[in-house]
Amino acid sequence: MTTQHTTGHTTGQTTGISGAEIRLEEVVKRYPGQKTAAVESLSLTIPAGEIVMFVGPSGCGKTTSLKMINRLIEPTSGTILIDGEDVRKSSADELRRKIGYVIQGGSLFPHMTVAKNIAIVPKMLGWDASRVKGRVDDLLDLVGLDPSRYRDRYPRELSGGQQQRVGVARGLAADPPVILMDEPFGAVDPITRQRLQDELLSIQRELRKTIVCVTHDIDEAIKLGDRIVILREGGHIAQYDTPEVVLASPADDFVSDFVGSGSTLKQLSLARVNEVDLRETVTARIGEPTADAVQRAEAAGERSVIVLDDRDRPRGWPWLRQLKGDRIVEPTEDLVTVDERSTLNDALDTMLTSSHGAAVVTGDRDRYIGIVTFDTVTDHMRLLEDRAVEERAHEQAAGERA
C-alpha cells in the first residue's frame, strides 16, 4: 500500500509565489538486473513556492528521485506532474529548459564567460540580445556578484563559492517555476557554505520558486527546508513534514536515529535571527567625509562604524582608528554577514570570526538591517531551552498522571 505524504504547513503569504506545485504519483525506478527498485512507489506533493529538502542515507534514492522530475532519469512507471501537467507531455529537452538545475560546483563551462554561462537557456529560448544581457546583470546582482566585475570573467578566475553563485544564477536564468538542486553547496568550505545557504534563503524570500534540494546534511535540511523528506532505502518515505515536526516528533526509530541524538539542540537551531531584537549602530557611506562619520560614532559612544555602499549593502566594519583619509573608502577586508533568516547557530559561528562580538545582519539583496549581539543570541537560546525543559516536565507529569 502506498501513502501520499503531505502536511498543512505553509510559509508566509501565498501572494508573490512564482513556483509551481509538483506531484509524484506512484513513481518507480527499476534498473535492469537489479532485484529491488531504486525507487519504489514514491508519492508526495511539493507545494508551490516552498523549499523541500530530500535527505537520507546513501543509496536511498534521493538523487534518483530528484532527477526523475526533469527526466534526466526516466521513471519506469508512475506520474510526475508540474502545475498539473504531466512531464512526459513535453520532450525531455523542452522540459529541462523550464526547470532550473543546480549541481555541486556550479558545473560551469570553462571556455565560456560568466555571462555566456548564464545566458545559455535564454538564448536557446530565442530571447533577444538586450533581454539576455539585462537578465544576466539582474541575476548576478541577485546572487551578490557585481555584474561590471564578474560578467566577463571565466570560471577559473572565480572562487568555489563564486562559481556556485553563478551556477544558481544560471539555474534561474529563464525564470523557471521549479529549481532542482543536487548537493549544491557540498564542495565548499563551511563559512562559504553558510553564506551560500543564506544567499539562497534571501533569493527565495524574493522569488518564491519551488525548490527541491538533495542534501546528505540534516542540519542543512533543517535550515533551508520548509519541509523535509527523509527517505529510507528504495525511496520509501520515512517522514515528510516541517523541520519542527520532524525534530519534535520523529515518525519512527529510523528517523530518530537519522536526525541524531542532538535533536534538542537542533530544535534550538530552528530559531532565526529575525526572531531576536537587532541593535542599531552607526553607519557610514562610502565617499562621505571621514570626520562626519567619526563624530557620529563618538557621539553615540561607538568605537566602530559599519560602512555601506550606495545600495545599503555592508562592505566593512572598521574601528574608528582604522579610518584614514578625508573620505570613507570601501574596506578591503571581506565582511562576513548573516541573513535575517539565518539560524542563531550560524550567527554565533559568524561572531566567532568577528572582533566585535556581534554579527551584521542583512535582508533582501544583502541590504543592511542591524546587528545581532552575542548576549542577545545566547539569552534567546537559553530562553528556548528553558521552555523546552518545562514542556518535557509537563509531558512527563501528564504521563505519570495517566
Image: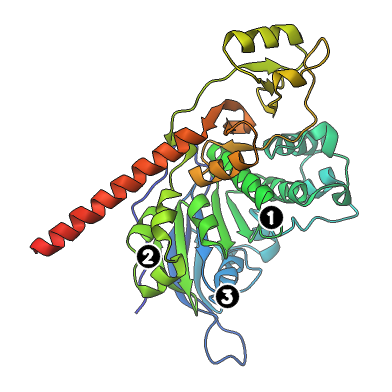
Q: Secondary structure at mark 1?
A: loop
In this view, 130 is above or below 382: above
Nearer to us in this view, 31 or 216? 216
Residue type marked 2: His
Q: Is residue 319 left or right of residue 128?
A: left
From the image, which quarter does the N terminus lie in? Answer: bottom left
Residue 254 coordinates in the image, percent (x, y): 41, 74
* Tags 1 and 2 touching, CB below 8 Å: no
Q: Earlier in the sequence, mark 1 or mark 2?
A: 2
Name the front one of labels 3 and 1: 3
What residue would you read off at disc 2?
5
Q: Is residue 4 left or right of residue 332?
A: left
Residue at point 75%, 37% (across, down): 145
Residue type marked 1: Arg
Q: Earlier in the sequence, mark 3 or mark 1?
A: 3
Mark 1 burial class by Cα count in 10 Å: few <14, some 14-19, many 20+: many
Name the front one of labels 1 and 2: 2
Mark 3 burial class by Cα count in 10 Å: few <14, some 14-19, many 20+: few
Nearer to us in this view, 177 or 104? 104
Q: Is residue 197 left or right of residue 119?
A: left
In this view, 159 is above or below 128: below
In 3D space, how far apart are the residues under numbered discs 3 and 1 (Cα atoms)?
29 Å
Residue 369 coordinates in the image, percent (x, y): 56, 26
What residue would you read off at disc 3?
58
